[in-house]
Amino acid sequence: MSLACRHFAICRREATHQHAGDSLHYCYLHYPERQGKNLDQFDEALRQHLESGSCDFRFFQFPAGLGSPSFSGRTFARPADFSEVAFNDSLNLAEAVFQQGLRIVARQTGPILLNQARINSGGLSVQLDGNAHVSLQRAVIVGAADLRSGSDLHLSAGYVEVHGPLSVVATSTSGLYLNSARLHEGFKLRVTEWCAGSRSFSWWLLRGDLNWQTCGFRGEVRFDEASFDPESRLDLTQSRLEGLRISGYKLLPKAIVLDATHISGDCRLEADVGEPRLKILAKSRRPEMDGKTIFANVNLSECRLVGNVFQSMAFSNIEWARHRGRWLLFDELVAVPSQEPAGRPERVLRTYSNIKEACQILKESYRNLGDHVRSGDFHYGEMEMKRREYGDRSLLRFLGLEAWYCYLSGYGTRWKLALGWLAGIVFGSAAIYYFSDPWAFSWNPNVALKYSVDVVTLQRPDLPKHVHPWSHWVRGIEAVWGPVQIALFGLALRMRLRR
């Protein structure tokens, strides 16, 4: 009685050999001893397996002397599975058609060639333990493509078209070439080390998001000639880069996420003139930018920046965060004690100090450009942080000089507020004068108002005799406060007219 192959469910063949290592029985396709296999006998068994219509090649052990197994140009009507296959040089699947997807799992392999292949429903899944080279030149993948390597992965995918999401996970990559690629549902990348000069994204089209979190890039990452879908997003959260450049006349992503991203070299993020601003997101943790950084035509309304060296940054046509009618750093919006761990007030105070310094630099920068609107707004932020440095429970924060400067004129930037206080002083004092001693002002409110104006303008009019003591106190306060408020109004109005 003949014995069945250990993998009879796959090959439907009788056993021809017993393996000394595990004492199990195998057919010629699955026999683990690859050295010394008869090539003609193996080819005949493989031909019969293919003619049966089977697309299951799991655990196949190709002869050591066979060279490169070739399935080029074949059509696989059912899901093709090359899990745990063993071969020497390369697995040639070029120009093949996979009607229901392709799966490859191998420990140590040569190149996997899928040039000009077409993979329909079911997508592509490649999982390799050792160094891997996968070629997808001009291939078409209707479903998802998932490529994984436990070591180095080299992917050549020029002119590839992937209609589902593309995912690449590897310890390192010695090459990732996607020139003229078309990715319709995004690209997920997880690579610990990506060598410089081993990538190309020129003239490609991306729809969906680029999820490149926690990756390591050696050398500068450039997207000068890449075209993104206007709604796509590039996520570089916690990634490490030696340089980043996203600019040019091509379509740019809607947003770039730089939460806790470390860029050790120069960085340039720029949208073309006339195009929508490129949005930079860093809501949780600021990016660390060690080199020279240029932001041009970008939106920083939700990007933490404080903690970087602002002197090494250049800003042009920036959309900052906006709160209560003024432009400000996003860090100022989120710098509140409730977001800090309990018992760490010193961290809050240091944050206020850092924001104050950043606002000082931006204030001077916009003043030198002649943009007094934003210069005034960042002056407000500078003074607000200075006031908060007293501490959130200190009376000086609410009753100190900076506090009154804020209350009375918005740190010299809000002329309407200053004018409102001035009008309140004049009319309020006139009302007190009149209702305290109406007879002293001939029972005429206009006379009391004229007297109040004279006091504010330092004309030093005398009070009528025998008036209520309240009027003496009000006159003294008005004579001091009124001129000060006029000066604050003049300062704020000057700032407004310079805008």
Image (spheres, rainbow, N blue to C red):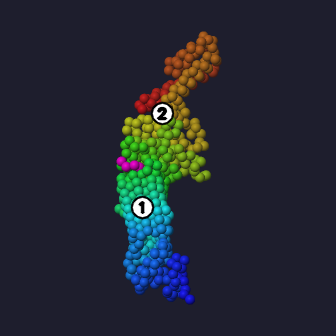
First reached walking from the N terminus: tag 1 or tag 2: 1
Number of callouts in the render? 2
The magenta stretch spans which residues?
249-253
Real-space Cα separation, disc 1 to disc 2, in angstroms: 60 Å
Q: Report the residue that reaches farthest toward the top.
A: 442
Residue 89, compared with residue 121, is above or below; it is: below
Q: Residue at horizontal 48%, vertical 70%?
A: 80
Tell me the crowding category of disc 2: few under 14, some 14 to 19, or many 20 or more residues within 10 angstroms, Cα based: many
Amino acid at dot 1: Val
From the viewer's perspective, is residue 108 above or below residue 326?
A: below
| Residue 145 x %, y % | 47, 63
Q: Is residue 293 above or below residue 410?
A: below
Q: Quick one: 285 or 365, which is closer to the camera? A: 285
| Drawn side of residue 180 relative to residue 12, left or right | left
> Which quadrant is home to the N terminus?
bottom right
Q: Position of residue 265 (x, y in %)?
A: 38, 56
Q: Read off the residue under disc 1.
A: 140
Instruction: Identify the mark at residue 413; answer none if there is no mark.
Output: 2
Type of amino acid under label 2: Thr
Residue 356 in view (yes/no): no
In the image, what residue occupies the spot 51% across and 53% down?
285
